Every structure is written in C-alpha cells, then in structure tokens.
Amino acid sequence: RLDLRLETVVGDRGVRMSGGERQRIALARALLRKPSLLILDEATSALDWQNQSLIARSIDGLRGAMTILTIAHRPSMIAFADWVVAMEDGRVVEVGQYQRLKAKPGSRLSRMLSGEQSETEPADVA
C-alpha cells in the first residue's frame, strides 16, 4: 500500500488508511528521524489496546536515547514515565515522579489508575 515507502502521502490526499494505521506510520516516521525530543500527543488514541501496548513498550525501550514528552489519557501510555504532570482546565494540578504519585493515596494519578475518576472529571496527564 505504500508505493513510495515512508514518503507515501497518507490520509485524505493520499493512500486511504485507518486512523490507527496513520498513527503508526506517523510514529515510525518520527522515530526514524532519531530526534533528541519526541512529543507524543495522544499518539495511540486510534489504536486498539494490543497495538497500544506494543507501542508503549517500544517507547519505554527508548528510555535514555531521547527525551519523550507524552500527552495521554490512557494509563498504559504513561506507565513508563519518569515524571507526571496532571492538568485540569489548562492548569497544572499535580507534578511528581510516576511511582511516588501512583503510591500516594488521593493523587490524581492514583485515582485515575484505580478508575475512581469520573467521565466528567478528565485529567490530562503528560
């Protein structure tokens, strides 16, 4: 399907692909550039949990090779994070090391991980 390999245009003006396929291609293109800083904004939102898990483990494998800023709502995408910044209504409400916030009762992260957060109370976690 990718006649021009990584240079193939995907999306509305190119090869028609699903959202998940486009996300995987975009991530592959970004990783091939070997950036010193990689920003992932909901990078797996269109993927099923199996592909998301594979990508999360791959990203974890890049630890030390580059700085990765991950913006995500799904716990599996932040499980490898060293630091977490939780935001609400555009404001920072919590900052800390992942493991400490996870273990801290009542923290935004621990509530999100335990499923206590309601649909009307989303936390943007980066």
Image: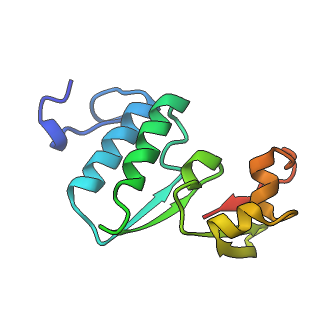
Out of 33 and 84, give the one closest to the viewer: 84
Residue at 55% from the left image edge and 50% from the top image edge: 77
Q: In this view, does 4 lie above or below 87?
A: above
Of all residues shown, which one is farthest toward the top? 1
Question: Residue 97: horizontal and vertical position, in percent?
Answer: 63, 72
Spot occupied by residue 113 in the image (x, y as percentages of width and height): 74, 49
Tell me if residue 74 comes above or below residue 100 in the rendering.
Answer: above
Q: Position of residue 103 (x, y in %)?
A: 75, 62
Residue, x 55% and y 31% (percent of image)?
49
Indicate the colouring scheme. rainbow
Query: Outermost residue toward the left?
Result: 4
Q: In which quarter of the image is the C terminus?
A: bottom right
Query: Which x, y percent locates residue 65?
Result: 29, 67
Viewer-proximal residue among 5 and 113: 113
Left or right of residue 65, residue 101 in this image: right
- The residue under the point 13% across, 29% down is 3
Quadrant of the snapshot with the N terminus: top left
Residue 21 relative to residue 118: left or right: left
